[in-house]
Amino acid sequence: MGDVKRIKRPNKADVVVPRELTPGHLERQRAAIALPLKDTNPLTADMVEPLTAQDILSWKRPGVQNGVFRKLRLGYYPSEAKLDLHGMTVDEARRQVFGFVNDCMRYDLRTATIMHGKGERNRDGIAWLKSYLAKWLPELEPVLAFHTTQKHHGSTGAIYV
């Protein structure tokens, strides 16, 4: 151990990140600012047929068996996911419904419940979220059918999907 010498420099890597932006960084920033965000949400926010609190929603795609639709309508299928739209604006609900249906498809969920509320407190008596939901769900290809829930699951304030 007599001829051992101390290392003058510490044996550590220099991990300081350079703060200057490379031309690639600048080009990506310019491209991100120049390109407008593309809305991939296909749900339209056009005018809809106004529905009231007591209206029943019912729809199925051609090819859905009557027995399957009947079981959905009667609430025989357990709900594997729930989405609550209470208190949301139409635009917020539009984004939530689109994301929710995509998540259900990603996780292979067959039946879900969407609680939209009855809209009884609206001054005009129109259930806006319910009205838009009745328009949006047929626009989504993964949705095969929907129906207003049974009384013990929310009655006309929610739907089975």
Image (cartoon, rainbow, N blue to C red):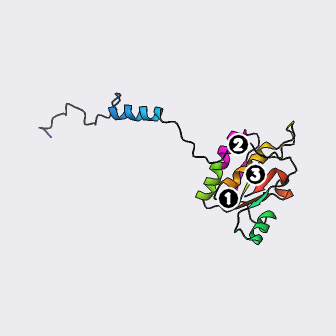
Residue at horizontal 53 percent and vertical 38 percent from the top? 37
Q: CA distance from mark 3 to mark 2?
A: 13 Å
Magenta extent: 75-97
Q: Report crowding for label 1: few under 14, some 14 to 19, many 20 or more residues within 10 A (C-alpha).
A: some
Residue at horizontal 84 percent and vertical 59 percent from the top? 150
Q: CA distance from mark 2 to mark 1?
A: 20 Å
Q: Earlier in the sequence, mark 2 or mark 1?
A: 2
Q: Residue beneath label 3, please?
A: 134
The percent position of residue 148, horizontal first and vertical second, equals 81, 56
Q: Report crowding for label 3: few under 14, some 14 to 19, many 20 or more residues within 10 A (C-alpha).
A: many
Compared with residue 27, is residue 65 higher up or lower down, i.e. above or below?
below
Outermost residue, top direction? 20
Please give left or right for residue 100 compared with residue 59 in the image.
left
Please give left or right for residue 159 compared with residue 80 in the image.
right
Q: How many marks?
A: 3
Question: Is any part of residue 4 visible from this angle?
Answer: yes
Q: Secondary structure at mark 3?
A: helix
Q: Residue beneath label 1, please?
A: 143
The percent position of residue 126, horizontal first and vertical second, equals 84, 42
Please give left or right for residue 100 compared with residue 23 in the image.
right
Q: Secondary structure at mark 1?
A: loop
Compared with residue 8, is residue 90 higher up or lower down, i.e. above or below?
below
- Marks 2 and 1 in Cβ contact (< 8 Å): no
Residue at horizontal 87 percent and vertical 41 percent from the top? 125
| Magenta span includes 84 | yes
